[in-house]
Image (cartoon, rainbow, N blue to C red):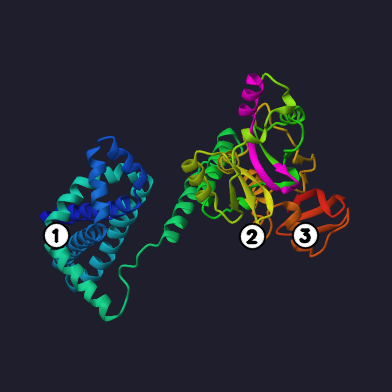
Amino acid sequence: MIESLIAIVLLLVLSGLFSGSETALTAASRPLMMELEKGGHKRARTVNRLLKTREQLIGTILLGNNLVNILASSLATSVLIAAFGETGVVYATAGMTVLVLIFAEILPKTYALTHTNTMALAVAPIMRALTWLFWPVTRVIQGLVQVMLKVFKADAGQEKTAAHALAELRGAIELHTAEADGDGPSGRTVRRERAMLKSVLDLADVEVGEIMVHRSNLVMIDADLPASEIVEQVLNSPYTRIPLWRDRMDNIVGVLHVKALLRAVQAYTGNLDEMDVVGLAAPPWFIPDTTTLLHQLQAFRERREHFAMVVDEYGTIMGVVTLEDILEEIVGDISDEHDIQVAGVRTQPDGSYVIAGDVTIRDLNREFEWNLPDDVANTLAGLILHEARRIPEAGQSYRFHGFRFEVLKRVRNRITSIRVVPG
């Protein structure tokens, strides 16, 4: 009898090992294990190999777990029948249910959830040996399962699409960064990093028309002006590349680089107004406004250029996009000593925000983690026009998407200033 009790205890320990191993190995961090394997960690390599054959691993664990549980229950029933007769079956059922539930299921799985990666590395060699040992049996079981699934016309091997993989990656970013989120410095750092990671994933979905510098804000120079006046306008501009137009502003004849102009001015010995400025300009590069940021980023790298003119389907100039614009979509605004600082967003003491109408919705969502829709309009003013279905007057208020919007100022048909109150 004592031997049977010792055997039952050992079988419960084995059952707990199988249950904990299942939880630890299936919940182990794949990125961490890959990084550890690159560093030469042998057990991490074992974990990755087990996870590559997940069906065989799960089959081995379930097979071993059921074997020890059934054997432990059988021994307990035999011992208690010998001690109490037929009522021993009831005692064995009740007792083993409690013991298996606590010591072979809840306790090991709870420990595995709180020490996932550590336990996964610890049990990996054991599970690898058992997987090899039980391989013939698990293969037969898997074969029977596949046959049954085919009989019932169930899809056992649904292929993961790119959309599913992308959604999973987004969820992983939200899950892991939310754990360290907060109001302190570390929380702000986490929010910035989360915004950067999500922005990288959005590059294939965002078009250059959504982030370009609109033509109303462009600095362009008439190519027919005297060279001395062109030089003066270039020096007064904060930009290093400036489009040149002739006859009409949609007729771009070149893109003038400040460095090329200054070199030519330094080397020129004649009358400055006689210098051919257009000859110094690079040919303009036109791209459609529907080009995605990912495609444009690759095009910038391939052409080794940083500047492109954005046109619509009719060939009309809509604006410009630069390499810096795309990088800012990932890391946020990049300001240097030559940038013009525009107070697009001002936080008010009452918790509201006074925002310029041309501030993009994507920037607001990224900065404040709002969820304003950016598929119907690019700017905050555009969103209000879309929702109001009219051009509102100054002083009018609207409530939608969980915010209250008050139009503070309108210049002609443009909304230039808006008060936004969350909630």
* The magenta segment: 245-268
Front-lying residue, 80 or 396: 396
Residue drawn at point x = 56 percent, y = 36 percent: 189
Within-10-Å neighbours for mark 3: few <14, some 14–19, many 20+: some
The picture places residue 248, in percent across and down from the top left corner, at 75, 48
Residue type for callout 3: Leu
Residue drawn at point x = 59 percent, y = 53 percent: 207
Q: Is residue 101 magenta?
A: no
Quadrant that contains the C terminus = bottom right
Residue type for callout 1: Trp
Label disc, if present, on residue 313 of the rendered structure: 2
The picture places residue 84, in percent across and down from the top left corner, at 18, 68
Q: Which residue is mark 1?
A: 135
Cα–Cα span, label 2 and label 1 = 61 Å
- Quick one: label 3 or label 1, which is nearer the N terminus? 1
Q: Secondary structure at mark 3?
A: helix
Answer with left or right where residue 215 lies relative to residue 79.
Answer: right
Q: Secondary structure at mark 2?
A: loop
Quadrant that contains the N terminus = bottom left
- Quick one: label 3 or label 2, which is nearer the N terminus? 2
Q: Which residue is mark 3?
A: 385
Cα–Cα span, label 3 and label 2 = 23 Å
Residue type for callout 2: Glu
Q: Secondary structure at mark 1?
A: helix
